[in-house]
Every structure is written in structure tokens, then in C-alpha cells.
Image: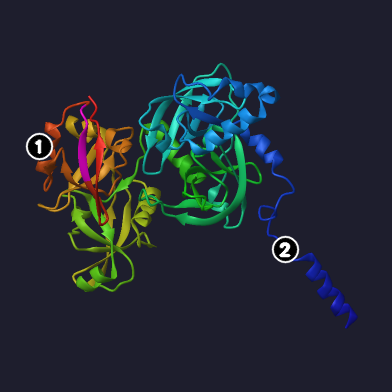
Amino acid sequence: MAAVLAVVLVLVLAGPAFPDDRARPPETFAPVAEAVKAAVFSVVRPGEEEHADDRARGDAWPENDLLHEIFDALTTPPSRTLGAALMIDPAGVAVTSARILRGLTAVELVALSGRRYRASLVARDDRTDVAVLRVVAPGPLPAARLGDSDAVRVGDWVLAVGSPYGFEASVSAGIVSARARVAAEGAYGDLLQTDAALNVGSAGGPLVDVHGEVIGVTTMAAPRGSSIAFAVPSNLVRRVVGDLLAHGRVVRSWLGIAPQPLTRELAHAFRAPFAGGLLLADVVAGGPAATAGLRRGAILLALDGRPLRALADLERVLGAVPPGRTATLHVWRDGREETLGIRLAQEPDPRQSDGPKRRLLGLVVEPITPEGGVFVREVLPGSPAADSGVIPGDVVRELAHQTIRTLGDFERAAESVTPREPTTLLVQRGRTPFYVGLTPER
């Protein structure tokens, strides 16, 4: 009996065994923070200096002025520091959040040492909120290493590094709160969720594991200090950056459809079992789905064996399957489930396939129904529409005070807009219509 009690006591004192040291709280995050901070840069508008050169005075700065500076930084929307950028190649390739660039094609990156580098935009992908910057420097720059985000588990410790409110290379710690979260502002999803503190100016910085490997690039934080923030997983960042460097855009597979989530009411109306799925609101003529015989009203259940319950599920699967491959599609139509083979095409490049007036606004649209408006398929990076907050999936109901029911209506309204003169766009997102203002480019 004493031997049994001794074994039990040892087990209790030892506690649960950790599968590896990623789950064990480190004694200090200092080594990881020191290793990665040099590769994190503040992103500022070209030619704009720090908010008060006095910050460099250090201890000579009067305490009351310092406190006033901090208060101002925390209560005034920052106009200088846009966010953070992570150097991933010593030759001068950096990655950041596409949203912080706000239509800029050139910015300056400020190192922790204070040295400034001119950076040009290589390309951006608004659907994943990833942008690539290139810096010309006289020598190699400190760079971080992208890790394997697929190995990250809920509960793992992470560090977030950014420039919140202009305080460069600020470090916060937390855990991975969840995986595969869908961003409300886009369809891609598959984001990492963390409770590490992120604020205005943090976007574009790295999310780092306890080994100093970058497992995500931060993209957004929930408001009002809710301890919820998100990061694009490093494996997705790696693929997007590779495509942006090689092609200037992300090469994705394409079905040629306008899908929407299947609700219980719609499933009942279409006499389909409510087990998830995407309802086809429209099918693009000549696209892969139309060629495979799919029509409006069909319900997509799974692609290559992976269930489709949300738009993000479809984006995720299409992002993993290369164009040109024949995929297996499970659908519900005509009262029964079917399995089809569908050859995926490459998503059309909006920079080449659309007329000058669409490029003027930065919108690539498709008809929903003959009289149902136009569906935003793509928002061109850095365009007036992108800067105004229009996202793929929105429905355009009015342009320049002209009602839009057909693609022809949109084209005629686009012809009436004048470069550099503000106009309005009425869009509908879900059930909510709202106006946005935008200024067409030349």
C-alpha cells in the first residue's frame, strides 16, 4: 500500500506531461523577443518624421512631457505609423498587412535603430490581407524565419511584435486561442486567433512561437480591448508571397460561380437536407461549373472530400488545389445527391480582362441575375474601391446616383464618372445596404 501511495504522490507532484516544450510557459520571452525585433520595422508614409524629435532625448526629456506624449499617442488616431512590416529575406523582401497601405505604392520602413529605408510595393492580395514590399539596402537586412503554422496548437504560447500607436517593436505575449477563424471582412478565413495584445499600428507584425519562428502575420484586432486578434498563418503567407513575387497576384483555382451559404429556410425551399452547403446564386457562362452542367439553384456539398459549409471553406479548398486539375464535387440538385468531376480553371486576372472604366473604380463585377444587380467578384488592390472598404461579395445597387440592375447599367454609370471627382456607391453586404464615397483614378 505504501508503494502505491508513493507512486500516486509522485504522479500528483509531477503533474501532466507536456508533449513538447511549446506548451510549457517559458521562464522568459526575452531571447525570442531580442531575436525577432530586429526584423520588425515600422511602416510610415514617405518623408514623415517621428512624432517629436525630443523622443530621442531619453532621460533628458521632462517626465510631464513624456506622460503627455504617451497620453496623446493612446488617445489620438495615429497619422504617421501605419503599422508594422516583417523582413523575411535579407535581400530586402518584407511582408506586411495590405490594409495598412491605404492605396500607397511606396512607404518608408523604420528599423529599431531609427534607420529609414525606402520600400516599394511589389504586389498585394486583399483577400488574405498580405502585401509584399521590397527594400533596396546597401547590405543584408535582419530577417525572420517563417515556421510551420500547421503545427501550431490551440494553447501554444506566442509573441506579437508591432508598432502600436507608433511605439515601435513593442512585444506582447499570449496564446493561440483558436484556429481556422473566418474574418468578417473577407471570405478567405483560416486565421489564427490570439489573445496577445494588438492595437492600432500592430497589423503587419509577426506572431512568433517560443522558438522564434514566425507562425503568422497579424492582420486585425477586435475593438475595445476584447483580447481577440487574428493573424494570417505562416504557411498561407509563404504561398501568397511566392505567388505575388512570381506573378504579381495570387494564382487561384476558379469554378465560375456566385455562391451563398445555405440556410435552413433555403434548404427547405429547395427540398434539400440541411447539412451545410453553398447555394449557387449564379453560374458564369463558359466557366468550369457551367461546363460541368451546374445551374443556378444547385447546392455544393463538398469539394475533393472536404465539406463546404461557408464561403471560407470553398476559398480554402480552391487555394489548395492547383488550376487545371480535375476535382471531385459533391452536389445536391433535382432532389438527389450527385458526384461530378470538374476541371478547375485559373481565376481570371482582373488586370487584363476588364475595361478601363472598371479599372478606374477598381471593381470587377459580374451579373447576379438578369435584373438583380452586379456582384463584386474582385476589388483591385490599391484602387478607390479598395480604399473605400468595398470587398468581394458585396452587391452594387447604385453608382453615381444611378440605379444598377444589370451589368449594362453598371457600365453606363461607370462611363459617367469623372476622374478625381468624388462619387458615391451604394452597396449591400448581407442584408445591410450602405453608401461609400470614392474618388475615381485617372
Residue 305, visible in the rendered structure: yes
Cα distance between the residues tagged 1 and 2 = 67 Å
Q: Is residue 427 above or below residue 165?
A: below
Residue 168 visible at all: no
Q: Which residue occupies the extreme top position in the image? A: 138
**Residue 397 in the image: x percent, y percent?**
17, 47
Residue 108 at x, y = what percent? 48, 23
Q: Quadrant of the N terminus?
A: bottom right
Q: Is residue 129 left or right of residue 336?
A: right
Residue 412's disc number: 1
Q: Image height check: is 16 above or below 126? A: below
Report the quarter where the C terminus lies: top left
Displayed quadrant of residue 99: top left
Please indicate whether residue 339 sits to the left or right of residue 37 in the image.
Answer: left
Answer whether residue 60 is magenta in the image. no
Q: Amino acid at mark 2?
A: Ala
Tell me if mark 2 has few (under 14), some (14-19) or many (20+) residues whose alpha carbon lies within 10 angstroms of its own: few
Q: Give the residue at mark 2.
A: 17
Q: Which residues are magenta?
A: 421-426
Q: Quadrant of residue 404?
A: top left
Q: Of all residues shown, which one is farthest toward the right? A: 2
In the foreground, 424 or 382 = 424
Residue beneath the point at 68% across and 59% down: 19
Could you say where residue 323 lies in the image, as x and y percent from the top left? Answer: 32, 46
